[in-house]
Image (spheres, rainbow, N blue to C red):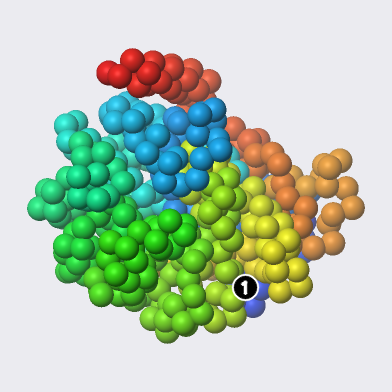
Amino acid sequence: MGTLLIKNADAIVTVDHQDRVLQNASLLIEDNVIRAIGDGPYEADEVIDARGCYVYPGLINTHHHLYQTFTRNLPKVQRMELFDWLRTLYEIWRGLDDDWIYHSSLVGMGELMKYGCTTCMDHHYVFPKQGSENFLAQQFAAADDLGMRFFATRGSMSRGKSDGGLPPDDLVQDVDTILKDSQRLVEAFHDPSRFSMHNVALAPCSPFSVTTDLLKQSALLARSLHVRLHTHLCETRDETDFCLQMLGKRPLAYMEDCGWLGSDVWYAHGIYFEDEELRLLAQTGTGVAHCPVSNMKLASGVCRVPEMLEMGVPLGLAVDGSASNDCSNLLAEIRAAYLLHRLTYSAKAPTGYDLLKLATRGSAGLLGRDDIGSLEPGKAADLFLLDVNLLELAGTHLDPANLLGTVGYARPAKYVVVNGKITVRDGNLLNIDEPKITRQANKLVAGMLQRAEGGQ
């Protein structure tokens, strides 16, 4: 792969453990690894002149539903909260197929990448009984085509309407089928090596869509295969009510009984944890993916981020499914989180830099990675450059570390580098034909909605 030099950046925000921001600095990449950061002089096969730019570690998305990219901006769901929103959209998601999965993954991950995200985690849990065997393979193919670092999960649903769950019965699978396929996919795609581009975790959907047996068996299987565990938890009051009525316990107590606590577990949302539950999460190293825009759109509530940070709960940032956001832009998520918590917590709110740390080093920790999330020699060469020599950023150059939260950045990155390779230049994806993919995606969406409306 050779060497790449990012030269004379106005600032490099390292997000290292010393929180260093280096002025007028350079960064040398050899193959896929950062070799040096500082004044230089360095020489390289390829040079990027970074004058007028800030350099940041690649953002890491810790919860997504890429298939939902094709059900964005639907008028009939815009006033719904989670349970009604899901019931309505399941009728469309019945039509998932390989083309939908591949192209929605390209679109969702492509948008993430254009705005500085270099690692995408996806929680795919909708598996129609026929034709879904290659869904994760399609996602990995899309990630490889883009050059994205990808963390897939084999999600699942086993509690349908007839058993008191939320999803339709034709979108649930039996436990044995789920476990067998989970092991197959881990063995086929999970790479635990340093700088890996492919990871897999096990991710039953939520307490209201899976059975107790599936949760317990998934925990046992994941630990035997040395992979991580993920699910939705404490996202809404409706979920808490469901657990109390159907299971006789609050959601976290139920998950604890199922073996779902520990440093290999992270939950999405985590809005309605009580004080003692937050302490338990901190004590056990159990993490939370914060999804502020989705939580606002679905009127779910506000995650207790300041308390989590104070207690030491592992915490990362995420965009959640595109249909509950309705975009895949982790750069915008940083500012949305900053403003949400300023409104809710005032002086106790996290700073813009605190939220950048969640989206980088914190998110890396949730995924069990210590090779990404900061700019340091020996770490993976995942980063992005923002052009800050712009009219809309005049007068904002006092604090590069906090900029993304306090001011925000509303255009694609100038450059994105993943695993040492340039994947975005001047805001454009280099590895795919964007206009062609856009046309194909819009055609697929139109056909999908037509089929759903026709009941086919």
Question: Which residue is located at x 25 percent, y 55 percent?
Answer: 210
The answer to whether residue 343 is visible is yes
Vertical arrangement, residue 275 with respect to residue 63, above or below:
below
The answer to whether residue 375 is visible is no
Question: Which residue is located at x 64 percent, y 57 percent?
Answer: 337
Question: Which residue is located at x 19 percent, y 67 percent?
Answer: 216
Vertical arrangement, residue 169 with respect to residue 215, above or below:
above
Three-letter residue code for mark 1: Pro
Front one among 163 and 116: 163
Vertical arrangement, residue 47 with respect to residue 255, above or below:
above
Q: Position of residue 156 (x, y in %)?
A: 25, 49
Vertical arrangement, residue 444 with respect to residue 267, above or below:
above
Q: Position of residue 96 (x, y in %)?
A: 30, 30
Question: Which residue is located at x 83 percent, y 57 percent?
Answer: 397
| Quarter of the view holding residue 87 | top left
Front one among 253 and 231: 253
Estimate how packed mark 1 is, as few (under 14), some (14 to 19) or many (20 or more) residues with alpha carbons within 10 Å.
some
| Quarter of the view holding residue 24 | bottom right
Horizontal side, residue 341 vs residue 371: left or right: right
Badge 1 is on which residue? 306
